[in-house]
């Protein structure tokens, strides 16, 4: 089945992306790793469905995720918007730190290009600003990669509004990637800066790290939500109720809400829900077409604005 999701300009740099993409992190998580053929099937079906923004990172599986994504899209490279992140340095065991100095920016990009099997990265994110390196140095090095044709557009992840302004003054930023869901709304404090600068937002974990789309025991889901998103224990019940009234899945309602926030703020927003299953992928893509009524939005806001951000 081939279809086409609507596209949106992401930032002011000429990048156009579908209104929903695919996050690939969980495809190489140690406890839930998907086999190469299954992962490739999901990624290729995402391309078929128009969810062509394929998101990975050099830290996922310590590079194995990029290799898997690269193999999956190699025969359809022109259809995919390849996005990856850098900035994490692994140490002994599970330890890690951040780097953002210019030589590291360049070496990270070269390594990602090799793993992805491509000569250009469509959207290259800094995972987090490095406290011991001026942000301007990191962005300047990323801008050099754009000038050399190794990167088409640059993005930031988990930044403040002030950091976004500083970066954007060095080189236009196309997108900010951050967690944004009914359970995690802290990003809304800096979204006005994105709107002012014309920067798009790419929400990861738009289903609340999978908790808001859980299909199992209701009481267990509520307990997990209470631990992860304190003060939002009523969210699972409201999502299930609205989904039942609509004849859809709770996770689809959660995703539809994220799409609605794009219209509220007047900015391009492309969520990247992750999945390892074809049926869940199809449900996620279908959620982009669900328009929530004012009453439904009010019910969701009533339980998502409680507790800490």
Image: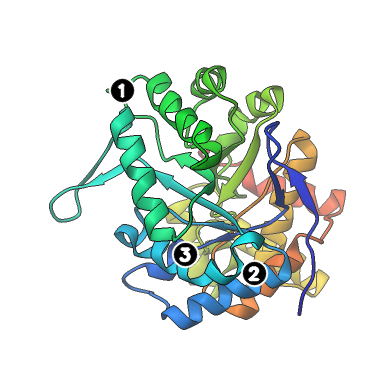
Q: Quadrant of residue 34?
A: bottom left
Residue appearing at x 56%, y 19% in the figure: 165
Find disc 3 in the rendering and name its residue. Answer: 70
Relative to 208, is 201 above or below?
A: above
Q: Is residue 91 visible?
A: yes
Residue appearing at x 67%, y 58% in the figure: 254
Q: Could you classify mark 3 by the number of other residues whose Cα lies within 10 Å: few (under 14), some (14-19), or many (20 or more)?
A: many
Q: CA distance from mark 3 to mark 1?
A: 30 Å
Relative to 142, is 295 above or below?
A: below
Secondary structure, mark 3, is helix
Q: Is residue 115 left or right of residue 161?
A: left
Rendered-image quadrant of the N terminus: bottom right
Find disc 1 in the rendering and name its residue. Answer: 133
Residue appearing at x 81%, y 70% in the figure: 245
Q: At which x and y percent is residue 257? A: 72, 52
The answer to whether the residues at label 3 and label 1 have Cβ atoms under 8 Å apart is no
Q: At which x and y percent is residue 108? A: 34, 44
Q: CA distance from mark 1 to mark 2?
A: 37 Å
């Amino acid at each position: 089945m081939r279809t086409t999701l609507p596209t949106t300009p992401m930032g002011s740099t000429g990048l156009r992306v579908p209104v929903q993409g695919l996050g690939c992190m969980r495809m190489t998580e140690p406890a839930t790793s998907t086999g190469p053929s299954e992962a490739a099937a999901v990624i290729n079906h995402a391309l078929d469905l128009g969810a062509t923004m394929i998101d990975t990172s050099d830290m996922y599986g310590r590079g194995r995720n990029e290799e898997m994504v690269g193999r999956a899209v190699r025969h359809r490279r022109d259809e995919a918007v390849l996005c990856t992140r850098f900035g994490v340095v692994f140490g002994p065991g599970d330890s890690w730190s951040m780097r953002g100095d210019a030589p590291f920016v360049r070496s990270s990009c070269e390594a990602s290009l090799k793993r992805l099997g491509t000569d250009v990265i469509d959207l290259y994110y800094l995972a987090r600003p490095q406290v011991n390196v001026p942000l301007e140095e990191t962005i300047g090095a990323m801008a050099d990669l754009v000038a050399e044709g190794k990167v088409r557009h640059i993005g930031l992840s988990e930044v403040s509004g002030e950091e976004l302004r500083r970066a954007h003054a060095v080189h236009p930023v196309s997108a900010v990637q951050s967690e944004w869901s009914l359970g995690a709304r802290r990003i809304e404090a800096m979204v006005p800066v994105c709107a002012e600068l014309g920067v798009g937002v790419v929400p990861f974990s738009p289903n609340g790290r999978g908790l808001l789309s859980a299909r199992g025991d209701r009481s267990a889901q509520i307990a997990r939500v209470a631990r992860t998103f304190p003060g939002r224990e009523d969210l699972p019940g409201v999502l299930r109720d609205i989904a039942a009234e609509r004849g859809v899945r709770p996770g689809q309602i959660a995703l539809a809400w994220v799409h609605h926030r794009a219209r509220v703020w007047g900015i391009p927003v492309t969520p990247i829900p992750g999945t390892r299953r074809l049926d869940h992928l199809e449900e996620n893509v279908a959620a982009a077409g669900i328009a929530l009524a004012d009453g439904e939005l009010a019910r969701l806001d009533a339980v998502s604005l409680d507790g800490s951000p």
